[in-house]
Amino acid sequence: MRTVQAGTLESMDCLVTVSDCPGEVKVSISGSGACRFRSSMEAAVRETLERLGVRDVSVDLQDNGAIDLIIRARVEAALRKRMEGGEAP
């Protein structure tokens, strides 16, 4: 199973971990904004997956106050690393 990450746990950022998940898409959200903004965060993740045509993944989003734009960028960065086959420096 290949797992990649993008982002940090610094304030106003998020850490996105993407791993293989055959047959389905799973989205897990935790962190400071999860209680209040879970539905919009999950929508941002799922819309990014759909836009990039990605299936069969598990996405774990650890939020520390990231805005929608940051969430989408971190998800896309992690997915691109996964597609390229490894971690970027």
Image: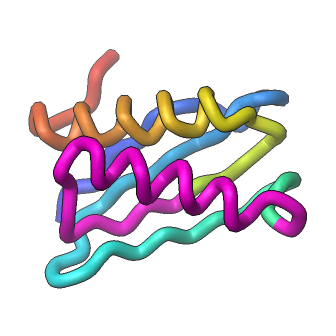
At x 36%, y 54%, the residue is 18
State whether residue 49 is above or below residue 73.
Answer: below
> Which residues lie in the magenta part?
35-60
The answer to which of 43 and 58 lies nearer the viewer is 43
Outermost residue toward the bottom in this view: 23
* Residue drawn 13% across the image and 39% down it: 83
Q: Is residue 74 magenta?
A: no
Task: Name which quarter of the figure residue 20 lies in.
Answer: bottom left
Q: Position of residue 52 (x, y in %)?
A: 23, 43
Q: Position of residue 66 (x, y in %)?
A: 74, 35
Q: Which residue lies at the image location 80% right of the left edge and 29% below the top edge?
A: 12
Residue 5 vs 17, above or below: the answer is: above
Location of the C terminus (image quadrant): top left
The N terminus lies in which quarter of the figure? bottom left
Q: Position of residue 79 (x, y in %)?
A: 28, 41
Q: Please identify the quarter of the rendering in which residue 58 is found.
A: bottom left
Q: Look at the picture and state if 23 lies above or below 70.
A: below
Q: Is residue 5 left or right of residue 3?
A: right
Please state which of residues 54 and 80 is positioned toward the viewer in this rendering.
Answer: 54
What is the x, y in percent for residue 41? 65, 54
Image mark count:
0
Query: Looking at the magenta stretch, what is its main secondary structure?
Result: helix
Q: Looking at the rendering, which quadrant does residue 37 occupy?
A: bottom right
- In this rendering, is residue 62 above or below 80? below
Q: How is the image coloured?
A: rainbow
Image position of 7 (left or right of 30): left
